[in-house]
Each structure stands twice: as structure tokens, then as C-alpha cells.
Amino acid sequence: MDDDKGAEFLDMIGRQARLQERIVGRAARLAAAGWDDAALRAELDGLLAEHARLEGQIRGAS
């Protein structure tokens, strides 16, 4: 893996870690709301979809 590809891969890993932190935060807020907040649920669904997309990119790059 050349330096540019390595830097891109590390950037994706960093983005994934930040995204996972956001997912945990939203899930905690949603749980505190009794899982009855449509806006939080939609935001969490979006974050999970973004995470799945990024995971696919990471798997494809490795």
C-alpha cells in the first residue's frame, strides 16, 4: 500500500471511530428517551447507514 493509500485508509478509520462515538451518543439519548423519539431514531438510522457504507469502503481498501 503506497503512502497516499495508507493515509486515505487511516483517514477512513478515524472517520469510522468518530462516527461510532456519535452512534453511541445518539443511542444513549434514544434509550434515555425510552426509544420513543422519532427524530433521534431517524438520526441514528442515518448514522448506522453511513457507518455501513464506510465499513464497505474500508473493507474494499484493505
Image (cartoon, helix red, strand yellow):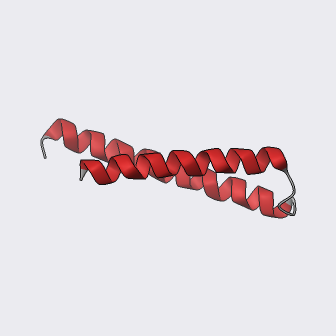
Pinpoint residue 55: horizontal percent, then vertical percent: 41, 52
Please tell me whether residue 29 is drawn above or below residue 49 in the rendered image: below
> Looking at the picture, does residue 33 appear above or below residue 19?
below
x, y (%) of residue 27? Answer: 71, 59
60 left or right, relative to 36: left
Q: Of residues 19 and 51, which is closer to you in this image?
A: 51
Nearest the eye: 8 or 56: 56
User: Where in the figure is residue 2, as x and y percent of width and height?
Assistant: 12, 41
Position of 49 with respect to 33 (left or right) is left
Query: Farthest residue toward the top?
Result: 4
Left or right of residue 18: residue 14: left
At 25% across and 40% down in the image, what residue appears? 7
Q: Residue at x 82, y 61 (%)?
A: 35
Residue 61 drawn at (x, y percent): 26, 48
Image-based side of 3 in relation to 40, left or right: left
The residue at 15%/39% (across/down) is: 3
Q: How many marks?
A: 0
Q: Which residue is drawn at 83% across and 48% down?
A: 38
